[in-house]
Image (cartoon, helix red, strand yellow):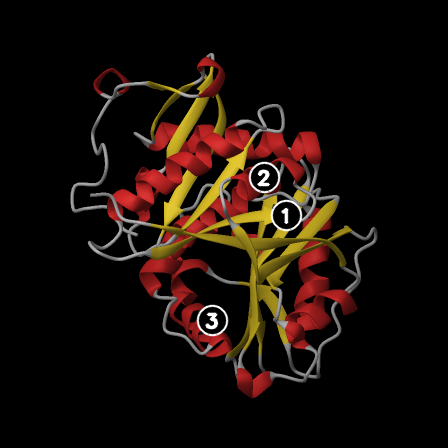
Amino acid sequence: MKPDETGPNRGATVSEVAMTQAAGGLASRPFESEADYDLIRRLLVEIVARTGPPVYATIGNLDWWRVAEDDPRSIYQTQLWFDSGQLVAFAWPIEGQVDIVVHPDYPPLHNVALAWSETYFAAHAAEGAVAPWVAWAFTGDVARIAALSARGYRRTERGLVVYGQPVPDPAPQPALPDGYTIRAVQGEAEAEQRVAVQRAAFESTWMTAERHARVRHSPTYRPELDIVVVAPDGEFAAFALLWLDEANRLGVFEPLGVAPAYQRLGLGRALMAEGLRRLAEAGARVACVETGLDHHTARRLYEAAGFKLLDTDYAWTRQVEPAA
């Protein structure tokens, strides 16, 4: 789902947006400004501090998701819930699915956020269509699963697996074939090459120079954590992007890929080792990575690099009829 040309509540202020009441007298309103993005980031940092990984989103995941959208203002579709001015939950509906994050002290908001998102989806669904609506839940999230089950969702076999490990100290040195090197991308000057290697690795035209520029301007982005393997002829052979939650000393790999012409050379393992080394230098103590449940090649790579499965985040679905 995409916002209209003006965007929901674009330019609105708190005084212009009616505050609705959620469960327990909590206030709820739409996302209004970039100041709300900062509030969401603080909530994610607090949740990691309280629970540790796995979590539904880190600040790096959030920045990456925003870059992934064709319209970076699609986050203005997000609904926020507050307790005494403190953000405690949000729901971000995107193209037939919703990402929900709830502070662990507010489990009833899982149900509230799901109800809101279903209403949103019904209002934006194509006229006459009955479409599946997707939400997500870790197998260990009892409160989320209870809310989903009560609302008629069923678990699918589609999911994301989240891996984690302590950052080794000392971190392993990357092992590379002769003539290959690993280094950070040199900003805009190498944006075209950086875009090309990601396109090749994922056989997709999704990454563009404009998108990579948005990556570089994301608040969590660190140039030294945007790394590439350079082949002997100077071509970029593989890449990895890492994000750091400095407060929680948590690093996240998102994404990592090797161009087809350079696969089976150990470049993925080398990128994992170099990423861990750089995270250690930056003060990280834990690293995470996620991939699709059925992405077996990536899973083998992460497991070989020492990552252990933390949980699986399954897609749950139900039919939602469009509003009249």
* Residue at the image point whose x is 75% and y is 74% from the top: 175
Which of these two is toward me, 140 or 231? 140
* Residue at the image point whose x is 62% and y is 35% from the top: 143
Q: Residues within 10 Å of mark 1 (few under 14, many from 20)?
A: many
Q: CA distance from mark 2 to mark 3?
A: 34 Å
In this rendering, position of residue 77 left or right of residue 4:
right
Q: CA distance from mark 1 to mark 3?
A: 29 Å
Of badges 2 and 1, nearer the viewer stands: 2
In this rendering, position of residue 4 left or right of residue 143:
left
* Residues at discs 1 and 3 in contact (Cβ within 8 Å): no
Q: Is residue 250 above or below residue 27?
A: below
Q: What residue did someone put label 3 on?
A: 198
Q: Is residue 237 above or below residue 242?
A: below
Q: What residue did someone put label 2 on?
A: 144
Q: Secondary structure at mark 1?
A: strand
Q: Secondary structure at mark 2?
A: helix
Q: Secondary structure at mark 3?
A: helix
Q: What residue did someone put label 1 on?
A: 138
Q: Residues within 10 Å of mark 2 (few under 14, many from 20)?
A: many
Q: How many marks?
A: 3
Residue 216 % position (x, y)? 43, 52
Query: Which numbered disc, 2 or 1, marks the residue that appears first in the sequence?
Result: 1
